[in-house]
Image (spheres, helix red, strand yellow):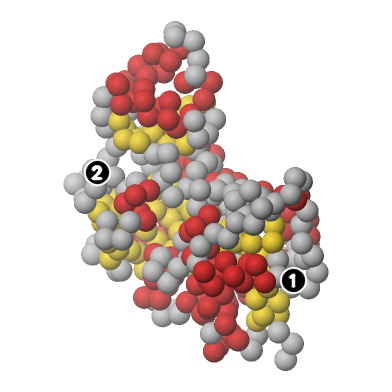
Amino acid sequence: MTKMRIGLLFGGRSGEHEVSISSARAIARALAAEENASKYEVLPFYIQKDGCWLSGTLPQQVLAAGKPLEIESQAGEAWQFPNFNGVDVWFPVLHGPNGEDGTVQGLLKLLQVPFVGSGVLGSAVGMDKIAMKMAFAHAGLPQVKYIAVNRSEIWSNPCVFPKLCDKIEAELGYPCFIKPANLGSSVGISKARSRAELEAALDSAASYDRRIIVEAGVVARELECAVLGNDNPKASTVGEISFQSDFYDYETKYTEGQSECSIPAKVSSAIVSQIQEMAVQAFLAIDAAGLARVDFFYLESTGEVLINEINTFPGFTATSMYPQMWAHDGISFPELADRLIQLALERHGEKA
């Protein structure tokens, strides 16, 4: 049987470069596992932090090392792509901007070759927290109160900025969370408990992105649900993230021992069903495909479930929540990788 050649695309120019390498290593191992080895041949392609694309033995070395391998690039090389001939299906293992936001998906679409995950629309809406929340609101999904802000309002004249802060205090109050709209992995997120902290947090977020979102703080448990499929997606069991820090920031997320995941989450069957239904609604609302992880706030004091966000290419290591939730439901990591490739072929066959 002729093996299908999988273009494993990883690295990228976002702050999640190292996470991408870890995810790609896990997927490469899954595709080389006994049940997949006869079906797939992996062709790795590595995007350096400077945007240079590499193929051949160098990406293999990065996967083996599990860390970035910086090769000095010549001017203009970032736009010189390696030979893509021979790739049957792309597996873009890219997290964050310049990879998970529809930009690479547009390139792969132009190549007219199947690829794993959401297309241009789903990826772009899933990346931008403001557009995402607007899609959720249109779908009738409950969420925390929020205010969308532009960098121009923050880095403005002395009259505009104080009025913006007044509005945030009046409509959201403290504590509130300030987030760049287009960054993943909790990069650039701050919690404000006072006017001084709010002003500093807005200035910091504006240094990362021209679109910023400010959300009201809630006392809640943080629950997650994995989604798998295309037009008829299925939701996994529900998991929970718990931590001792003030909030789930980048350090807490990626420092060993700082957070714990519980699968399944210890909540009632009614809450599980509600979250699973909302996760599928969110997936369809942004036109996602293949996979996504949907995050929720569960306010035990009132019984409310609020949607937080959707991640169209979540962390994909053996210890990441997405594959762990499916493993609990009986889908092994190698089988999950195989299913995602089959879903890519299905979506490509629809000529969507």
Please report the residue visible at 36 percent of the width from the left and 22 percent of the height from the top.
199
Q: Residue 346: tell me if it is visible.
A: no
Residue pointed to by mark 2: 246
Q: CA distance from mark 2 to mark 1?
A: 45 Å
Query: In the structure shown, which secondary structural element does the residue marked by tag 1 occupy?
Result: loop
- The percent coordinates of residue 50 (x first, y second) are 63, 48
Residue at image coords 70%, 51%: 73
Taking depth in this image into account, of 149 and 38 the one nearest to the observer is 38
Q: Position of residue 82 (x, y in %)?
A: 77, 62
Q: Quadrant of residue 217?
A: top left
- Residue that lies at the very extreme toward the top in this rendered image: 159
Residue at the image position 23 percent from the left and 64 percent from the top: 266
Q: Whole-percent x and y of residue 228? A: 51, 67
Q: Quarter holding the N terminus?
A: bottom right
Mark sitting on residue 87: 1
Question: For the image shown, how many numbered marks are present on the structure?
Answer: 2
Q: Is residue 71 left or right of residue 282?
A: right
Q: Element under label 2?
A: loop
For the residue marked with disc 2, what is the amino acid? Asp
- Mark drawn on residue 142: none
Around disc 2, counting alpha carbons within 10 Å, would you say few (fewer than 14), some (14 to 19), or many (20 or more)? Answer: few
Q: Is residue 267 visible?
A: yes
Residue lying at 48% horizontally and 29% vertically, measured from the top left: 206
Mark 2 or mark 1, which has the lower sequence index? Answer: 1
- The foreground one among 71 and 301 is 71
The correct choice, above or below, for 86 with respect to 250 in the image is below
Instruction: Determine contact: label 2, label 1, CB under 8 Å.
Output: no
**Viewer-closest of 229 and 292:** 292
Q: Label 1 amino acid?
A: Val
Quadrant for residue 60, please give it: bottom right
